[in-house]
Image (cartoon, rainbow, N blue to C red):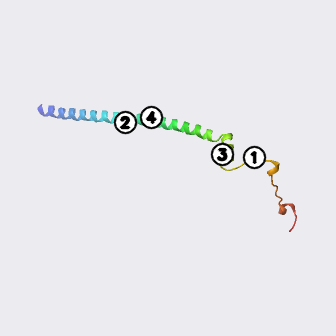
């Protein structure tokens, strides 16, 4: 009888240890999942911010301003228009 009690006691102890280990692992995985969800929400917010910034950078007014200031471009007028004649396409030989 004592041998049976001893075996049952060992089984109970191992079962308790397995339960504690399982609980710990479950909590750890739950925390890791929460961290992953938080990171996903942070990345989604950053993506939205960057998308709005990209759209703001690509407006026609901003592109025009950068073209004028940084590239020294200006609007076309007949006074500054140069026409190029392609002699090869017009059939005129040299």
Q: Which residue is mark 1?
A: 75
Q: Regarding mark 4 in the picture, which secondary structure is present there? A: helix
Q: Is residue 66 left or right of residue 34?
A: right
Quadrant placement of the N terminus: top left
Counting residues from the N terminus, which is met first, the one under dot 4 or under dot 1? 4
Q: Which residue is mark 3?
A: 66
From the viewer's perspective, is residue 84 above or below residue 44? Answer: below
Q: Is residue 25 left or right of residue 36?
A: left
Q: Is residue 37 left or right of residue 89?
A: left
How far apart are the alpha carbons under marks 4 and 2? 14 Å
Q: Residues within 10 Å of mark 3 (few under 14, many from 20)?
A: few
Which numbered mark, 4 or 2, is in the foreground of this view? 4
Q: Residue at x 18, y 35 (%)?
A: 10
Q: Nearer the viewer, residue 52 or 2?
A: 52
From the viewer's perspective, is residue 68 above or below residue 44? Answer: below
How far apart are the alpha carbons under marks 3 and 2? 50 Å
How far apart are the alpha carbons under marks 1 and 3? 13 Å
How far apart are the alpha carbons under marks 4 and 1? 49 Å
Counting residues from the N terminus, which is met first, the one under dot 4 or under dot 2? 2
Q: Which residue is mark 4?
A: 38
From the viewer's perspective, is residue 20 above or below residue 90? Answer: above
Q: Any mark on residue 29, and which?
A: 2
Q: Regarding mark 2 in the picture, which secondary structure is present there? A: helix
């Amino acid at each position: 009888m004592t041998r049976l009690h001893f075996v049952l006691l060992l089984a109970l102890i191992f079962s308790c240890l397995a339960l504690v280990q399982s609980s710990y692992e479950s909590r750890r995985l739950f925390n890791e999942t929460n961290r992953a969800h938080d990171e996903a929400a942070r990345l989604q917010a950053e993506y939205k911010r960057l998308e709005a910034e990209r759209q703001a950078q690509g407006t026609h007014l901003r592109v025009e301003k950068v073209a004028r200031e940084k590239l020294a471009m200006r609007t076309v007028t007949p006074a500054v228009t140069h026409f190029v004649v392609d002699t090869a396409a017009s059939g005129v030989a040299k």
